[in-house]
Amino acid sequence: MTGFSIVTILFVLLTASLVAIISRRARLPYSVGLVTAGIVLALLPNGIDLPLTRGLIFSVFLPPLIFEAALQLKWADFRRDLPLTATLAFPGVVIAAAFVAAAMHLLVGWSWIGAAFFGILIAATDPVSVIASFKEMKAEPRLSMVVESESLLNDGAAAVGFSLLVAIVSDGAVTPGAIAGALIWTAVGGVAVGLAVAGVMLVISGRTEDHLVEITLTTIAAYGSFLAAEHFHMSGVLASLAAGLLFGNADGKRGISKSGRPYVSAFWEYAAFLVNSFVFILIGGHEAHQPIHLVSGMAAVAILVVLFGRALAVYPLSALFSRTAVKVDIRCQHVLVWGGLRGALALALALALPTVVPEQHQIVVVSFAVVAFSIFVQGLTMPWLLRRFGLLGKG
């Protein structure tokens, strides 16, 4: 089955439903079950063959996942931890990316530009994988808030870094002023677009209590903010994050009505389930066809340096807040390192690599290997780690 035909979509949905039932009974992470199912389906004689592109991930899959996650965030909690999460998201990505780039250049022999591209695309934790996993495991609320918030924010840093590297490849150089301007344009611009789009939808929403209209307006806010920001080369993730936060925290008079909120929440919970199902099955399908065995040595090095780079960012930066109200104890820091999952976001950027990068094909295959390790090894051991440290929630 090739392409997104009706029959293929229905087959994927049936597979996702069965995997959800089996995963819950076996107490295994749902994302691991979906990726496994994707690999099995791809290896069948008449298996499914669905496209996985940057455009599909960014234009179709990411907006509802980011918006749904932000819709559930409480502004007071998000704002309280913002100094910590923003530090982990922006300087943290720079530290991790720089270490990974240097290590891949020195240990594997990749060109500086190829190593830099890999470092920045793999440094940011993936909102799709992180949010899906931590919600499913019902981790301790504040830990979930920090991990999910950071994963939402650090995409902005990765997007800026990636676009700057593309500019270097295209034009040959960028100035420090251009870097600062790109950061402001991408991050601040993305937030501004998200607030503007959501603000307009809220004005309309405040004039009705029809939950069907409210669901429609939130859908426009989720996709409209993301696509508008991406069109102007801003961060779509930060735009959808801002839009979701605004919608989720506006009161009944200026936002979703009290009677409509349960319907809106149920719709977006289903949307997240639907999108996660397709994302992870598609990842599994494409993992099955990657010649990872041809770059197994590079992949092993990459996995180790990515983990070390994450640790190099988390532990020192967390120490800066050890005497503040937003301090993170050492158990949570361990989880932040091991729970920094990679997934669809890294693959989307890898698939968008300029053809002039010498190691383009190797970077794509190694990225798939790191994502596979992240989902299967880190994903499978996260529940044990949370239980070991007593960081599971009561709900």
Image (cartoon, grey):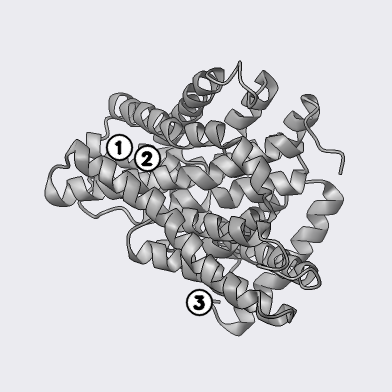
Mark 2 in CB contact with mark 1 (< 8 angstroms): yes
Crowding at mark 2 (Cα within 10 Å: few <14, some 14-19, many 20+): many
Looking at the image, residue 127 sits to the left or right of residue 229; the answer is right
Disc 2 or 3, which lies upstream in sequence? 3
Is the residue 105 above or below the residue 349 in the image? above
Q: Quadrant of the C terminus?
A: top right
Q: Which residue lies under the disc numbered 2?
A: 120
Which amino acid is tagged 2?
Ile
Q: Nearer the viewer, residue 307 or 168?
A: 168
- Look at 57% across and 21% down and name the residue there: 321
Tell me, yes or no, if residue 50 can be seen here.
Answer: no
The image quadrant of residue 76 is top right
Which amino acid is tagged 1?
Ala
Instruction: Point out residue 28 in the picture as x, y percentages from the top left corner.
Output: 77, 46
Q: How many marks?
A: 3
Disc 3 or 1, which lies upstream in sequence? 3
